[in-house]
Amino acid sequence: MIRLILVGILLLLSLAFFLQNQEQEVTLRYFFGFRSASTPIYKPILGAFVTGLLLAGILLFPAWVRGRIELRRKTKALQEAEVDLERLRQSLDKALHKSSGHTTPEFIEERSDE
């Protein structure tokens, strides 16, 4: 949640920068000394920001997938444990019914509540 808030703040700051500097232009220098035509200043900054978000998404994606897979495994294990518990309860009820054929139903209900 904190990451989402930080990304939202960064997006708002980049939008504010974009809106304030729409008219500003800059000349970029490349490695070999060539000059490009003047370009609005927000374009390279916005491009770098988008590239950073893309790289962060690529780096965080495997962890997110791993977390989802672990959650799915734990959920499946929990469901299987619940099914096993229900089977044990049913077998216990059957065993109580067989072993206490002469007992009263109240005794069986008291035992199943425990």
Image (tube, rainbow, N blue to C red):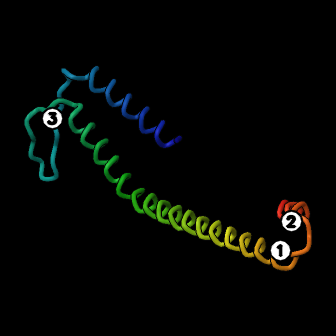
Task: Say if mark 2 contacts mark 1, CB within 8 Å.
Answer: yes
How many residues crowd around disc 1 within 10 Å: few (fewer than 14), some, or many (20 or more)?
some
Please name the amino acid that badge 2 sits on.
Ile
- Disc 3 to disc 1, C-alpha distance: 87 Å
Q: Secondary structure at mark 1?
A: helix
First-in-chain label (2 vs 1) = 1
To which residue does mark 2 refer? Answer: 108
Identify the image quadrant of the C terminus.
Answer: bottom right
Q: Residue at x 86, y 65 (%)?
A: 108
First-in-chain label (3 vs 1) = 3
To which residue does mark 1 refer? Answer: 96
Where residue 69 sits in the image (x, y, percent)? 47, 65
From this view, report whether residue 89 is shown above or below residue 20: below
Q: Residue at x 57, y 65 (%)?
A: 74
Q: Residue at x 16, y 39 (%)?
A: 28
To which residue does mark 3 refer? Answer: 27
In the image shown, does 72 or 103 lie closer to the viewer?
103
Please name the amino acid that badge 3 sits on.
Thr
Point out the frontmost of discs 3 and 1. 1
First-in-chain label (3 vs 2) = 3
Q: Residue furthest front?
A: 102
